[in-house]
Image: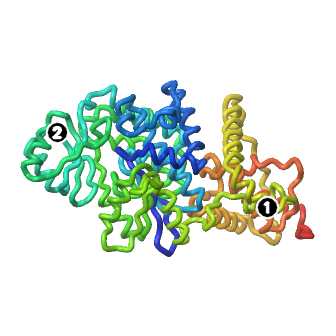
Amino acid sequence: MPENTSTGPSTAFVFPGQGGFDGAALRRAKETYPQVQRVFERLDSATDALFSRRISDVLFGPEQTDLRGLLAGDSWMSQVAIYGAGLAAHEILTDQGVRPDVLAGHSLGEITALVAAGAFSAEDGVRIVAQRVAVIERHDGIDGRMVALSAGADRVRLLLGLLDDPLLAVATENHDEQTVVSGPDGVLDQVTAIAAQLNIGAIEIDAPFPFHTPALAPAAPEFEAFVRTLDQRRLQRPVYSPIIQRHYEPGEPLAGRLADHFVQPVRFAAAVRALHRDGVATFVEAGGRAALSKLVTRLTQGSDVRSLPTLALDDGDRLALDATLRELRAAGLADPDGTSGSGTGLAELLAPTVASDLFEAYWKAHGHEVRERVRRDAEAFAEEEREQGREQEPGPSPAPAHAALDRDEVLGELRTLYAQALEYPEEVFEGGAQLEAELGVDSVKQVELLSRVSQRYELPPREADFRLAPYNTLDAIADFVIAELERHPEPAPTG
């Protein structure tokens, strides 16, 4: 798995599942943070293709939308809304300079965590979520629900044993006094009746189906087959699964794991405790409501753990995300001025004659538009390449080793430089790994990093017709550095 190389306390983003949506908070965030619209525009393309309806029109239309309203509509709506809210929260936090050391998701939230870590595109995440709903609707097991009982998992299992129904199961273990049960409607009525006699509280969960139950086993193979058709990429950040109780390996096949989620329980309490033991001291709930942040507070009571919500409204009708970012900045876990992802480092490259403060102001207002345009152009180019059946343009031919510089040494230095700049583990930077297709490093960031490489090795200015495309692996960049040093053995003039 990717390892956390930091020596101090670490940070985890946790993504909510069923119930993790607050429509009013998401609307409030959209007014202030452009990342919300940016994320949902990407999701709209997928929902429009799948359902002939944009999820943004559902969530941000003239009528206020809450979770109950979504559950009353088509089943995919609530699930995509929960997924999209988590992804938007992740984008806001990371654009503000918050760098999680590990991601974890609760049930549906695990799909969001994997997408946020780079395993799938945002659009494919929608397709996964939508297929998860579709296969359940096509199989038995949808006539059921989920109920949270105010008792520990061991006690709840004893209660379920009295009924001895094979389709009744513990779905999630949230904390020592809350366990969610999933199963058919009739037998759950018996569960709640028995619980009432034992003074065990019961609360209905806002979910369209009885997830994490043997009743869904027939739907799992079809779902797994679908996920296998999607383009899975290497994880860019560690993801810890409360279902399998370990980190995913960077290149681990995920189709089977996600299909197993249909029937396996979520052990959220055990996951939080394991992450805390591993050094996580700050948990940020990336998504709607504040249920997970409250669970984390309860599970880590008596410790110095910080547990923070995002897309939820507090008692004063204020967006929790604003206070969370202030606290993260005060703790040194976010950029102090909220300008992460700004034009710092790009100003000299893109507009060397413009005053830095003016470029910074421009980038803060329009940088997201530039990044989005570059992303769309890159995707359009890749699609054109696929349609025309052309192979990717080859990189420069390997140059002979420079007399004063060994190629392996250059490759090692590049690996360190890129890992530090991107805050990735060094081991993910294999020489042939595609920077964008496999590691998710967009074109703007690649240009910035190549500028750092040029400064490090004092390379001459690049020619006017220089193209970035051939230099999409560290192998190609190392060859480029050595070739440039061979051609220009003297350092480039600095004045």
Q: Please state, as top left, top right, bottom left or bottom right, where the C terminus lies in the image.
A: bottom right
Q: Does label 2 or label 1 sit earlier along the sequence?
A: 2
Tag 2 residue: 188
Residue under pointer 1: 481
Number of residue marks: 2
Quadrant position of residue 413: bottom right
Residue placed most toward the observer, 332 or 1: 332
Q: Position of residue 34 (x, y in %)?
A: 60, 48
- What is the CA distance from the residue labelled 2 to the residue labelled 1? 66 Å
Q: Is residue 210 left or right of residue 227?
A: left
Q: Nearer the viewer, mark 2 or mark 1?
A: 2
Q: Amino acid at mark 1?
A: Val
Which of 36/211 is in front? 36
Q: Give the residue at the far front of this rendering.
A: 316
Residue type beneath disc 2: Leu
What element does badge 2 sit on?
A: helix
Per the image, label 1 sits on a secondary structure element best described as: helix
Nearest the viewer among 379 and 18 is 18
